[in-house]
Amino acid sequence: MSMRSALYERAEPLWRQLPAVERQFAAILRLPVIGPLLTWLRLDFAGVVGAASFFAWSLTPSLLPRTWYYQALVTGVTAAVGYTIGALIGAIIRFAVRRVRRGWRPDRRTVLIAWTLLGINVAGWSAWYLVASARWQSELRELMDVGSPGPSHYLLILLFSFLLFVGLLAIGRLLRGASRWLGRILSRWVPIPVAVVGSALAVAGIVFWSWTGVLYPSLLGVANNAFAAINQVTDAQRGPPPVTTHSGGPDSLVTWDSLGRKGREFISDGPTAAELEEFSGRPALDPVRTYIGMESAETAPGLASLAVRELERAGGFEREVLVVVTPTGTGWVDDAAADALEYLYNGDSAIVSIQYSYLPSWLSFLAEREQVEISGEELFDAVYERWSRLPEDSRPRLLVYGESFGAVGSAAAFEDLDELGTKIDGALWVGSPRWHPLREEVTRNREPGSLERLPVYEGGQTVRFWGGWHQPLDTTGWEEPRVLFLQHASDPVAFWSPELIWAEPDWLREPPGEDVLPHFNWYPFVTFWQLTADMAVSGLMPEGHAHNYGGELVDAWLHVAPPDHRWSEERLDELRGNVQSFDLEDDTRLW
């Protein structure tokens, strides 16, 4: 029995019902609005297979639990991409078959049976994955101590992802229609194959030019103006600091207003000498916090030079430890990192940073990625030049710090790990993106058998990776200067990359971290889009997960640059509970 006969035999009970189904469907097509809509849709069979596959894969777990609207966004976009890929493959197959069997087309009965079976399978497949997704999301929420969104969560996903899919399909159909219209015109003067290819390239070129030449620059300009306005806004309760050790205070070389929103928050949020004394029980100093906003100079070298003069004025070169910080896109410096260091050193510390952008890091990455590297390099070089002129026995310990996008800029001042080791006394990089140049070097040359997410490099002699409280860190044999990468297994910022579109990374083949589900698998494009959505909410997860490091920064500083004073475990536990990386009410601090 042929495969086709077997298909008919299995579908015979169903086939007997098809005439009635056809009549009902014909009646639907005659309805005023629904009929034209269904006629316009005319879904491609292979495209529906691709869309259904991508729809199901998009419901599988990634690193973080997702809100319904993010899940709907992921699902709608991936289903549209799946439809496009499926339709393209289907067109290629049909073209190849018709080249071999000229004039071949499947008969009406085969088409009806195939579509009916596909509809039944897609419905069952979708229902199974929606139920499984509910279970996976519940498991993720338990791992991260996040509340449930309620039973309507998955109905909303289904509805809004479908609407998004139809919207994207409509855009694709409009572009295809434009290409066919142009092809018909071109076919009057050139052969039809040339007209088809030429019209498709012309429409693609127009779309590309419209985005890169008009829409993209315009949107970036609007975003820059909007965030520049936000940069001027400050909580009415914040005011210039009363101490000379802080920028914007008495005798400062820069005004309070010039610091920008994130700079004013950083300067005003730190502990005072009195608070440090109350915590430690010992005499304390007012920590040095110097920060230069973008409005204080026109160029990165100018900002860096001013930062060094401001640091010198505030007495930063006379402290026990000096930290050069590259902030994130908006100019944000993590309060948890700054507070932890200042408490551990009882105020005998200095921090210097400069702002390089008004935009959040994800927009900075798209629009001005090189700016963070220029800023980080200029600031460190300027500080290092002044620091190296001090007598060796009276220099502060020189450290570098960067978090998220700021970690990339912080590393830009060093050609490689050898140069890093000759210039600093320690480095702490938190939640660094995968394209961090020194992290790439270490990961690429890691010891065989070590994990990509926690690579071992040269026996951990200088560089070590720590997964946070979920992963104990052995400091045995760790020589100075110490370099530490702190990154959670569940942090999408640390593992996102464009290569996820087409290639499975090593870290997804490895045993998962303690807060990552074993069901997390890689799918082409889908995993890339899942992690892209995860990044937007990664800072809103509870402390110790995703991109929220909080109290772990206390231990990170103790590993990288332990102070001479030995703190009791009771005091350290209190400090871990007091520092916090993210204000959950601030939705601009997502990267």
Image (tube, grey):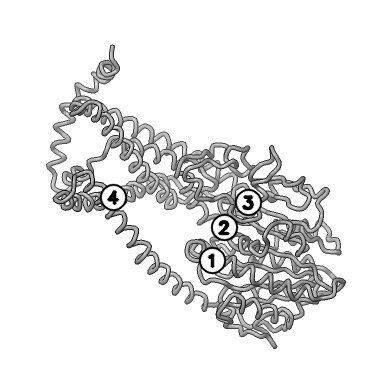
* Residue 26 picture location, percent across and down: 14, 36
Q: Tag 4: residue type? A: Gly
* Label 3, residues with CA under 10 Å away: few <14, some 14-19, many ≥20: few
Residue identifier under label 1: 586
Closer to the chain start, of discs 1 and 3, is 3
User: Disc 1 and disc 4: Cα gap in Å?
Assistant: 37 Å
* Label 4, residues with CA under 10 Å away: few <14, some 14-19, many ≥20: some
User: Disc 1 and disc 2: Cα gap in Å?
Assistant: 10 Å
Q: Is residue 190 above or below residue 252?
A: above
> Which quarter of the rendered picture does the C terminus lie within?
bottom right
Asked whether, in this view, residue 13 is left or right of residue 144, the answer is left
Residue identifier under label 2: 539
User: Disc 2 and disc 3: Cα gap in Å?
Assistant: 23 Å
Which mark is in front, 2 or 3?
Answer: 3
Asked whether, in this view, residue 44 is left or right of residue 355, the answer is left
Q: Circle 4 sits in a helix, a strand or a loop, which is it? A: helix
* Label 2, residues with CA under 10 Å away: few <14, some 14-19, many ≥20: many
Residue identifier under label 3: 440
Q: Is residue 206 above or below residue 105?
A: below
* Residue 558 picture location, percent across and down: 78, 58
> Which residue sits at x=24%, y=23%?
14
Q: Tag 2: residue type? A: Gly
Q: Circle 1 sits in a helix, a strand or a loop, which is it? A: loop
> Which quarter of the rendered picture does the N terminus lie within?
top left
